[in-house]
Image (cartoon, helix red, strand yellow):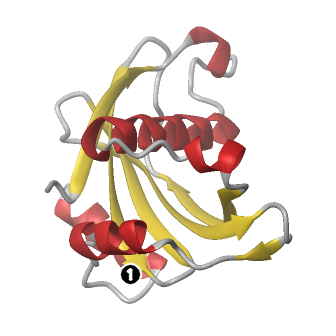
């Protein structure tokens, strides 16, 4: 089973500032939309599928993002993502945005998701099938924190 998922997108006009750069806030949308599509395609995992029937959802509890190079209007970008940490109640996902040739890193994001029961308004344990999947696909990074990881990726892409 794949640990690193990848998809492409096009930077849209309405998502850009007057300099034709992707708005900082829109990076999150591009990352999260890509991850949602990737999970469905690779693992048949609908992240919103449990919300209606079971009342469970993943909430974003934190984001760390670094903007390294602008994503330009009309540009094709590649977004790859991987689960770097999993616990019984949470996940940390690293997502990276690249130019089409994957030679220039544009941005990197770490998002922590907490599995949450909407009915009880409390965090919840991942069901066993999800826990098994997460243990199979988790691919930790060797760096200890976001800043170390950012420095490593910048040096790697020079």
- Nearest the eye: 140 or 146: 140
Q: Decide if residue 47 is on the left or right side of residue 10.
A: right
Quarter in which the N terminus is drawn: bottom left
For label 1, count other residues whose C-alpha is less than 10 Å away and answer few (under 14), some (14-19) or many (20+): few
Residue wearing tag 1: 148
Question: Can residue 150 be seen?
Answer: no
For the point 45% across and 50% down, which residue is it? 68
Q: Percent from the top left, x then y, of residue 92? A: 48, 71
Quadrant position of the C terminus in the picture: bottom left
Q: Quadrant of residue 79?
A: top left
Q: Which residue does the image show at 34% across and 70% down from the upper left?
A: 134
Residue 114 can be seen, yes or no: yes
Residue 105, percent from left and from top: 32, 47
Q: Where is residue 51 in the image (x, y as percent from the top left)?
A: 68, 48
The residue located at (38%, 89%) in the rendering is 144
Q: Residue furthest front?
A: 53
**Left or right relative to 121: residue 58:** left
In the picture provided, is 142 more to the left or to the right than 32?
A: left
Name, please, the residue furthest toward the bottom.
Answer: 144
Secondary structure beneath dot 1 equals: helix
Residue at 35% in and 39% down:
38
């Amino acid at each position: 089973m794949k640990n690193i998922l990848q998809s492409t997108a096009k930077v849209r006009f309405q998502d850009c500032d007057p300099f034709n750069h992707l708005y900082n806030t829109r990076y999150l949308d591009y990352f999260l939309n890509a991850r949602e599509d990737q999970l469905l395609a690779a693992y048949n995992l609908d992240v919103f599928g449990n919300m209606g029937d079971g009342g469970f959802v993943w909430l974003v509890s934190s984001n760390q993002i670094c903007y390294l190079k602008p994503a330009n209007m009309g540009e094709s970008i590649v977004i790859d993502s991987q689960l770097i940490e999993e616990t019984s109640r949470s996940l940390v996902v690293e997502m990276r945005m690249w130019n089409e040739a994957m030679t220039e890193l544009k941005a990197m994001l770490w998002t922590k998701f907490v599995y949450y029961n909407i009915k009880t308004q409390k965090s919840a344990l991942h069901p066993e099938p999800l826990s098994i999947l997460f243990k199979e696909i988790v691919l930790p990074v060797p760096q200890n924190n976001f800043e170390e990881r950012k420095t490593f990726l910048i040096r790697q892409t020079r």
